[in-house]
Image: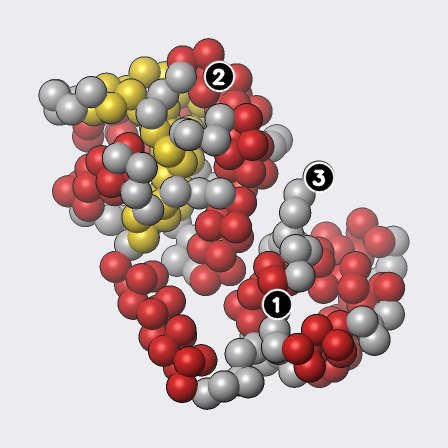
Amino acid sequence: MIKLLIVDDHAVVRSGLRMLLHGRHDIHVVGEAADGQEAIDQAEALQPHVVLMDLSMPGMDGMTAVGELRRRVPELGILVLTMHDDDEYLFRAIHQGASGYILKNAPHEELVTAIQTVAEGNAYLYPTATKRLMSEYIQQAAQPGQNGGVDAEGDSVYEKLSEREKEILAWTARGYANKEIAEHLMISVKTVEAHKSNLMDKLGLKSRPELIKFAMKRGLLEYD
């Protein structure tokens, strides 16, 4: 029997998931949580096999909670259930320690399969995400040196970034919007945009997913 903890800030979503899984002999919902901190408390108290984790929640968000749960309960299966069909969120979730990643619009049968897969200690990615990652790997393998700025030359260029550019690189890779970064660093949005444009030019990065992969390689996505 798989003990499951459901984490989502919307009560109707939690209720719907309970109803969806009701009657299954192999999955038992042992609890619910509405934010990241409650998820951590419930996971430690209820000791589920799998946590079904939303990402966008008030208070402690799901991404932060994934990292904290992975540190506190290393053997726990953490399956992200989200509406974000975006490489940025996928890479961050995996980096934080998620065992799997599935979309909220997935068929019922796929959700069950994902829960079972993660409970068995294996990783699960929804099919299109797996295809994208494989295609990207094949493309990079076929073009040595064209790896989104994470080669030796890119690392060398990183050291030439200003401290402000390094800060903005880290905040951007963690998913913060320009306005949020500006507020945190107490500078203007235009200044953030200028620094971001400069640092991406220096590193030879063309997109946010490339920026995230570069940041992951350098260990810039560790959360406090």
Q: Residue at position x 45%, y 62% from top?
A: 87
Residue toward you, 103 or 163? 163
Q: On the image, numbered disc 1 is attached to which residue?
A: 214
The answer to whether 143 appears left or right of 132 in the picture is right
Residue 33 in sight: yes
| Residue type, label 3 | Asp
Relative vertical location of residue 39 with respect to residue 120 in this rendering, above or below: above
Q: Give the SS element for disc 2.
A: helix
- The percent coordinates of residue 161 (x first, y second) are 82, 72
142 displayed left or right of 127: right
Upstream in the sequence, badge 1 or badge 2? 2
Q: Is residue 76 above or below residue 85?
A: above
In the image, residue 25 above or below residue 63: above
Q: Earlier in the sequence, mark 3 or mark 1?
A: 1
The residue tagged 2 is 44
Residue found at the far top of this picture: 45
Q: CA distance from mark 3 to mark 1?
A: 19 Å
Residue at 36% x, 78% y: name it. 138
Reading the image, the residue beneath label 3 is 224
The three-letter code of the residue at mark 2 reads Glu
Alpha-carbon span between mark 2 and mark 3 = 20 Å
Which amino acid, mark 1? Phe
Identify the element where label 1 is drawn.
Answer: helix
Assign a secondary structure to mark 3.
loop
